[in-house]
Image (spheres, helix red, strand yellow):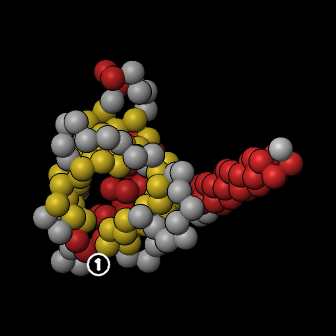
Amino acid sequence: MGYALGIVIAIAVVLALGLLLGASRLRTLSRRVGSFPCSARPARPQAPWSAGIAQYGVGRIDWWRCWSLAPRPTRTWHRDRLTVTGRAPLDQAGQVDQYLVRCRYDGVDFELTMSSGAYAGLASWLESAPPGRRGLVV
């Protein structure tokens, strides 16, 4: 009986530490300068959304999945290879102040959802690319 109780307590402690580390990571990512909430999915209608946090870097955007313990971003999109191909407000879907942003990176289409302020930041960031890289935003 004592051995089984010890195993149950050990498992509970490991789970609690995992949740605590995940919450701490999420808080740290969301408080970084240049970060914004952003969900992503492949450009297929039935593909599931993954909640995440994106952050601007030097010439790139790093995207982390929200509930993960990975120390590195799940995806990285470099400015010179990222193109916004379209956007649509999600007000009709009940998501006020949210945009569906269609993107292409190295020939692969995907979609992001973000607030209107985050979209304005993304569009400005893409348009401020060095000369010869304009026209990345529709």
Residue type indicated by callout 1: Pro
The N terminus sits in image quarter: top right
| Residue 9 visible in the current orientation | no
Secondary element type, mark 1: loop
Task: Report the side of 136 relative to 72 (left or right).
Answer: left
In the rendering, at what x and y percent does residue 118 appear?
44, 49
117 up-or-down from 135: above or below: above
In the rendering, at what x and y percent does residue 126 appear?
31, 64
| Residue 6 visible in the current orientation | yes
Task: Report the side of 29 relative to 38 (left or right).
Answer: right
Residue situated in front as seen by the camera: 19 or 26: 19
In the rendering, at what x and y percent does residue 62 appear?
43, 66
| Identity of the residue drawn at 35% across and 42% down | 49
Q: In the rendered image, which quarter is residue 94 located in?
A: top left
In the rendering, at what x and y percent does residue 95 appear?
41, 27
- Furthest-right residue in this view: 2
Q: Which residue is mark 1?
A: 130
Task: Report the side of 94 relative to 88 (left or right).
Answer: right
Task: Report the side of 12 relative to 102 (left or right).
Answer: right
| Identity of the residue drawn at 43% across and 32% down | 97
